[in-house]
Every structure is written in C-alpha cells, then in structure tokens.
Image (cartoon, helix red, strand yellow):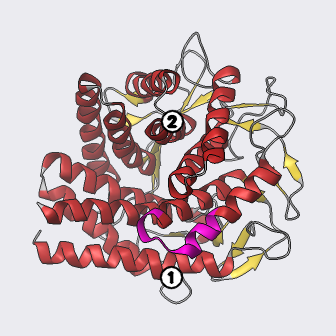
Amino acid sequence: MDRKRLRLLRSRMETELRDNILNFWLRYAPDTVNGGFVGIIHSPCEPDASGPRSLVLNARILWTFSASYRVFGNPACLLEAERAYDYLMKHFKDAVNGGMFWMLDGQGIVTSSKKQVYGNAFAIYALTEFHLASGRRDALDEAVSLFLLLDRHAHDSVHRGYIEALSEDWSPCVDMALSARELNAPKSMNTHLHVLEGFTNLLRVWDDPRIRERLREILQVTLQHIVDPVEDRFQLYFDMNWHPLSEKTSFGHDIEGSWLIDEAAAVLGDPALTERAAAISERMARRARLTGMDPVNGGMYDELRGNVLHKGKIWWVQAEAIVGFMNAWQRTGEEAFLEEMLDTWLFTDAFLVDHACGEWFDATDESGKQITSQSTEQGQKAGPWKCPYHNARMCLEMMHRLDATLKE
C-alpha cells in the first residue's frame, strides 16, 4: 500500500476520534443532574439518565478520555476523565470490602454488588491510564489496591489464573456469568483477556515483582490453555482445571487477543516469551483472516457456533479487526493483512460509523444493513457494554502505528 493512502488513513483516524467519537460522548454522556455519565444512550442520540450504570461503561469512559488527553492535550478530555474517576470512587468503590461493584441504577445506588473480576480488571486498566494522564498518585494507589485484592481473593493458586466473580464480601458466589448470554463457568477467556490487558497497563507504571509475576502467569495461561493449539483460536469457557466447556468461536476476541498478547509480551520484555507469543499471535491473526472475514462485503463476522456461522457485523469486532490486522502486517510484512485492515475500515466507515449524529451503530447484517438483533446493545449508542473504548482505542492505536510506519 502506498504511503499516500497510509497518510490519508492516519488523518481520517484522528478526525474520526476527535470529531465523531469523543465529541459525541462529550455532548451526550455527562449527567449534570445525578453526576457521572448516563447509563444508556438510545440511537441515534437520546440520553436516558434512568438506565443502569455498569462498571464496564464507566471504566471504559475513564480509560478513553485519559488516553485521548495524553495524545491531544485537550482540557475537555481531562475534565471528563476526572468526572469518571470521581464517580467511580464515590459510587462504584466498595468502601467496606474493597473492590468495585458491578452495576448501579441511574441514581448511583448499587443494584449488583458482586465483584466481577472482568469489571475490576477494567478498572485497573482505566485507573492506570488516568494516572498516566493526570499524574495523580491516588489513581495509581487505587489500581494497585485492586490488583492486590484480586490476587488475594480471586487468584487460583493451584491451577493458575482467576475465577470469574465473587460476592460483595469476596466470598464465593453462584452466579459468575458476565451476562445472560454467557456461560456460568468458573473461568473464561474474556475475563483473562482483560485481566491481561489491565495488568499490562499496571506494569507500565508499577514495575513491582508481584504484578510482573502475575502478568507472566496470565500470558502463559493464555498461550497454554486458552489458545487452542490445533485451531489457533481462543476457547471461551473452562472449568477450574482448564478443561474447555464450549466449542464456540468468537472472531472478534481472537483478533483482539492476537495483538493484546503481543503487547503484554513486549511490556514484560522476556525474549523467549515474546518469541512464543509472536508466533501464536501471527497464527491467530492468520486464522481469523481466513475463517472470520466476509470476502464479498468486507468486515469480520461475529462468531461460529458449531457449524453455524453468525454473519452479523458487530461494531467492536470491526474495531479490533482493524488493529489486529495492522499488527499482523507490522509483524509479517504481508500485504494481505494490510488490505484486510483497510477493507474492514471501509466497511465500518460506510455502514457502522454514524456520520450524522456521531459514534457508531451497534451492528449490521452481512451486507451492511443495520439490524439490532445481531448485538447485545439492541440499537444503543451507549449501554452496559456499548462504550467509546474499542473504537476510540482503535483510532489511537492506528494513529500511533501509522505514525511509526510513515517515519520508516
């Protein structure tokens, strides 16, 4: 691909982030009555302050505006990050038992007090990014405290890794599933992928032997147990002994994991582990390209359940495919990965980006027709799982990676 096209893409990524994604969240998400951010924004741009407020959404908002401030230096981004941090500390933090609650109502009252490891890992990810953006030591202290709590209560010292969830007081709980769509299993790929992500960011700012040891463990668990060694894809659910409990394939998680594995290994700085991770990352990206892509319309399919291919195009899947294929091209130099990245962006820009009201629609069918039944968001622009993290992070990653490429 010629450098002119890469420069145009670099410019488009910055415009998309500044003008379309961040401006949408700055305009519609803050709740000036109840504090923090509304939990639901109905498509195309209808805030609903009465909707539930998830730890995932609030943490991802904190991460997005912190990371964006670090790049652009826009005071408005730092103000929104501070709003998210203050709300997280005031309403989501359990002042008695430690850790973060899972869900609140629109007035900030706790409706689900369990300690979902997935959500607390995202809080670590966001708090460390906020520390990097603001320089505030208290944010780093909160991230370290969460890490120590997870390590004390959720770590499996026998089989390694982390269990899915615990009760409010960190005692065992029956319902560990992330949502009604998820299997109620004691361990999952999804939780470990984002523990890996959160611990990677924490190690960047707190190079302590304890976090270094756990990040290494999570990466090794991922490479040894979570990645299927035959099919080069993630297995999704496990019992305590790491026996797989599902045959479903999630293409979006596979391609997202391919570059997050690379990132974690790079931050750890272990040459042997980096080499092993790079080989597996490349194989995962190659398989996702061969089995998860729409060769006619462009874009990445949702998932494979048994022999049934679900051909919906989910917003976050496309964002991760763009970064994942860019990472694979940087690793291998194979133009096929670069072209797949561009084709996925062109599909996304044409059918998922809302050029009129801002942000992205949640899902389309394989041809690009919007269809809410394909996703958990049901047409929402913001919700417990719909946030500015995947698409904003995609823009930030692509800006950084394209800058590096264009300097060569």
Extent of the magenta region: 70-81
Instruction: First in sequence, mark 1 or 2: give its number.
Output: 2
| Magenta part, dominant SS | helix
Label 2 packing within 10 angstroms: few (<14), some (14-19), many (20+)? many
Specify the quadrant of the image occupied by residue 169. top right
Q: Which mark is residue 119?
A: none
Q: Is residue 384 visible?
A: no
Q: Which mark is residue 199?
A: 2
- Tell me the quadrant of the picture where the C terminus can be found: bottom left
Kind of residue indicated by mark 1: Asp
User: In the image, is residue 297 above or below residue 222?
Assistant: below
Answer left or right for 152 relative to 101.
left
Q: Residue at x 68, y 21 (%)?
A: 152
Q: Is residue 228 visible?
A: yes
Q: Which mark is residue 354?
A: 1
User: In the image, is residue 184 above or below residue 301?
Assistant: above
Helix, strand or loop at label 1? It is loop
Q: Residue furthest top?
A: 158
Specify the quadrant of the image occupied by residue 158. top right
Is 280 colored magenta in this rendering?
no
Residue 85 coordinates in the image, percent (x, y): 69, 56
In front: 381, or 399? Answer: 399
